[in-house]
Image (spheres, grey):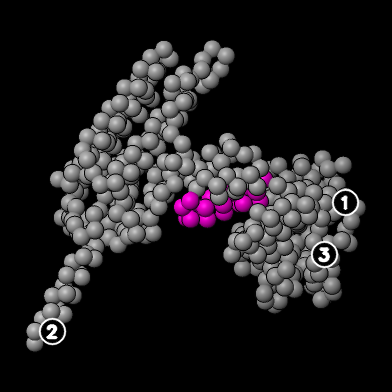
Amino acid sequence: MKFFYIVFVSLCIACQNHTEPVFSGKISAGENVSRYMLKLQGVDTSFIIKPDAEDHFSIVCSESTPFFMLEGKVWDRNKEQWNFVSPVYLQPGKSVTVNLMWKDGYMEIDTDDKVNRTIQAFRLYHGQIMKELWENPPLSGELENWVADYSRKAVGIVEKRRYNDEVRTFLTAWRQIEYINVMKGIRYLFPEDSTFRLPESLTGNLPDIPQVLDKPYWKLFPHSEKDILFYLQDCEEEPEGQLNVLKERFQTESIRQNISKQIIMQFLKRYPYSEANRQRLIGLCRDRTDEKEIIALYEKKAFISAGASLPDVTFEDLNGAKRSLSEFKGKYVYIDVWASWCVPCCAEVPYLQRLEKELNNKDVIFVSISVDKNLSQWKKKMQQLNMQGNQWIVTDSVFSELMNIRAIPHFLLYDKNSKLLEYHAPRPSSAVLKNKLQRLP
């Protein structure tokens, strides 16, 4: 019996040592609020806060770090939306209770927890400063003293009490990133020109982005992804250089993975398809587990970029004969990608038929390509709509995949050399299409 008692006590102690923090409280929204949404965002997971009938809530949080962002949206009776965000510190094994009070477009957060009281004191002060900056900005000659005063008071609030290293590091990082936001506001209000320059005392004291954000909880800070990307772009213009700086100056693995993916996706948007750029992309994706998916996504640009050639794909007409878009080389080709089950597609058919009759340009060819899976339904719908001319159907999914068509109806326009003019051509119902096709030489 004594043995079982010792085991029981040991288990209780173990459970106490691993107790998850509890975040609870009450929200007072006021009569002017029609509804609201609350979420506690962690590094790994998020927790939706659902108050009960009396506006109380309580959630048990499990995370790799004790830091969270409380995010909320509030809609007033006039359907105007307000957003707010605030850091929250939840120490393992302890509970934090807060009172959320919505007043005049601002969420007040009251608590007895010392760390979170410091967080709210700084949040309130910084919010007032940003409001002052936009509504009553200081004169350019007052900027240096204004920023120095802000920085001194911000440091005083955050470092008023002594906290453990973990809390102190977080509070310092948050204060520094908000300092950067103040400087962004100043740059916006006082654009640098021939008559004004930001004082060196201000720009020289800007925190280093890797020093501030290279933390496990980096994503909790608003705009952190953009801040890191802009920093890398300031360091290097080309993606290869940006990835090198990312690897050299940031140690947090989640930053490396997330930001490197964004750098690569920007490459996909920025550079037109070519074999040289494809080889560059292969180099950028080296050692990535999603390399094949990214390369495949880029290869689709071979057919959807301006100037791309017609894909070498075979279709079938009403009689089952094999047809190819290369038949119309020397003509402009306007393509309508549709399906019998697509209501918006069918709604465009009468406009397309009218356009074919009225257009006075014999160099324009119209082709309707159906992505139907059922041959009989395709033919039945064409008969109902009295569709004539070049009516083709895909024989497999290759065409849609090559052209990256994810929604229909979709309209394409090719020139006389079978090169893509417009990937998103105007609809037949558009007022501009007829004039556009009429003017084609």
Q: Residue at x 33, y 39 (%)?
A: 172
Residue type, mark 3 in image: Asp
Q: Residues within 10 Å of mark 2 (few under 14, many from 20)?
A: few
Callouts 2 and 1 close, C-beta under 8 Å: no
Where does label 2 land, which residue?
A: 4
The quadrant where residue 132 appears: top left
Give the position of the N terminus as an image quadrant.
bottom left
Q: Residue at x 13, y 84 (%)?
A: 4
Where does label 3 land, which residue?
A: 312
Horizontal side of residue 294 vs 109, given as left or right: right
Where does label 1 land, which residue?
A: 417
Alpha carbons under labels 1 and 3: distance apart: 14 Å
Q: Residue at x 16, y 80 (%)?
A: 7
Give the position of the C terminus as an image quadrant.
top right
* Dominant secondary-structure state across the stretch colored magenta: helix
Q: Nearer the viewer, residue 356 or 10?
A: 10
